Amino acid sequence: MAEPTYIRLDIHGQVCPSCLLLTLKALNQHCGAIRAGQVEIVVMTDDRQSTSTIPGAVSKMGYQAEVAILEGGYRIRIYGR
Amino acid sequence: MAEHPFFLILVTSSLAGLLAGFVMHRSDFCVAAMFRDMFLFTDFFLLRMLVLLVVVSMLAFELGRLSGMLRPYPFPLLGAPSLASMIGGLVFGIGMVLAGGCVVGTLYKLGSGSVAGGVAFIGMIIGSALYAEWHPVWSVFAKATALTSAITLPQVLELSPNLLVLPLSAVGAYLLWQWHRQGKLTRPSYAAGHIAPWKAALILSLIGFISYLLVGMPLGITTSYAKLGALLESQVWPEHVAQLTFFKAQPLAYVAPFGSETLRGGPGPAFDAVGAIQYPLIVGIILGAFISAKLVGEFHLHYRIPRRQYVSALLGGVLLGMAARMVPGCNIWHLWGGVPILAGQSLLFLLGILPGTWIGSKLLTRFVIR
């Protein structure tokens, strides 16, 4: 299977709730490709709240989320399958 | 030094601020998000945390009053409920969404390195100082639209507070029990050193109780934003500041629980009881959040954010600063302190903040985060 295309969102320092809003916007724009496993969204952020809200919101929509703690922030990967 | 009337106040407020800042950063206890997420995402999770904080404080304050531990009752600086409080709440709601946090939320965000939080903080100082220009007109409006001269709902109804507060706390406790059984009071978080918001709610209500016990009132900070604004403005325009009636007023005059003399204070630039209570809280919250962020390696300044977010943070801050004086009082003061004792001003503020947050959410998604 081909490697998915990554859509990277750098949301460091932005006003809340930029993380969740911009993630949902990207999900809506690419929903078909994400569900098919062709595209994944990778959010880089320092927003602690989004490590809770993004996985909660995307799982309700049928997507998966994976949070990794990085140096000074978080990487949240959102994928379809 | 220990006999100095401000000593206990300074120590209590500093420690309260430090602990509150640390806990709010770790749990991301954002009051703006509590209301905003309800409108933006139909997410009521954080609002449940506010209900928890209010119900616990309601019960604690009432037990404190009944046992004679908490005095004065109602606490100082609460005024007659008027339409001004509701309109102020509406403007406050818009401001806190645009600023990305309330008057305390922006402080803990600033402490953890948020540049937008810092811009909102500057906006709040500007807004508070601007309010002084039209305070005479607004205070006439507030007096003209006062619904009653009583401070709290039990006073309006001429009932003993426990007859209203205890049944309301029982209803709140039942709701919380139901939410607990349905697993609605917790949710997973992957943030480093995370403190669950329900624990933060309990800690913050304990801090509010201790502040009431030792300082004579729960947490509040916004008069000092005006104070800071007056202090800065008086450096460049001293004659103008000296003639503004708002800065001459001394609305605080009370005897602290463990003091013997009357302490006075107001929004003017001089260091007084208001400064002694609130400045350490402001510094403490920023410092507490800074320590928390440093300990988990998350203190980083990020400047490169869309320009419109800076504009929004500044504008939101100005609205917050003005609104906090129009009410008067902020969300922490009214929601964590006034609502638990059913203060009329606080209940009207709550009524105003709901449509305000809704309008703010619309503006945010239309113009700011796109």
Image (cartoon, coloured by chain):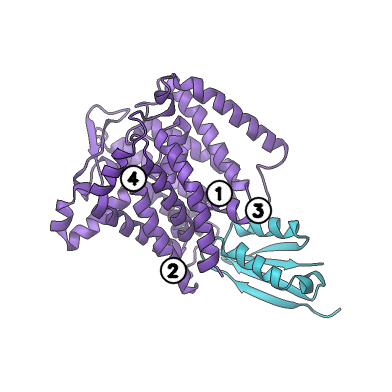
Chain colours: A cyan, B purple
Residue tagged by mark 4?
A: B278
Whether callout 1 and callout 3 share a subunit is answered yes
Which one is in front, B224 or A33?
A33
Real-space CA distance between mark 4 and mark 3, rounded to the nearest whole angstrom = 32 Å
- Disc nearer the start of the sequence (4/2): 4
Which one is in front, B43 or B75?
B43
Real-space CA distance between mark 4 and mark 1, rounded to the nearest whole angstrom = 24 Å
Q: Chain of mark 3?
A: B
For the residues labelled 4 and 1, say whether their Cβ atoms are less than 8 Å apart.
no
- Disc nearer the start of the sequence (4/1): 1
Q: Chain of mark 1?
A: B
**How many C-alpha atoms fall within 10 Å of the one at disc 2: few (<14), some, or many (≥20)?**
many
Q: Amino acid at mark 2?
A: Tyr
Is residue A7 toward the left or the right of residue B290 in the image? right
> From the viewer's perspective, is the residue at label 1 or at label 3 nearer?
1
Q: Amino acid at mark 4?
A: Gln
- Please determine whether, in this image, residue A80 is positioned above or below residue B146: below
Is residue B176 toward the left or the right of residue B54 in the image? right
Q: Amino acid at mark 1?
A: Met
Residue tagged by mark 1?
A: B34
Residue B189, label in figure:
3
Q: Amino acid at mark 3?
A: Ser
> From the viewer's perspective, is the residue at label 4 or at label 1 nearer?
1
Whether callout 3 and callout 2 share a subunit is answered yes
Residue tagged by mark 2?
A: B310
Secondary element type, mark 4: helix
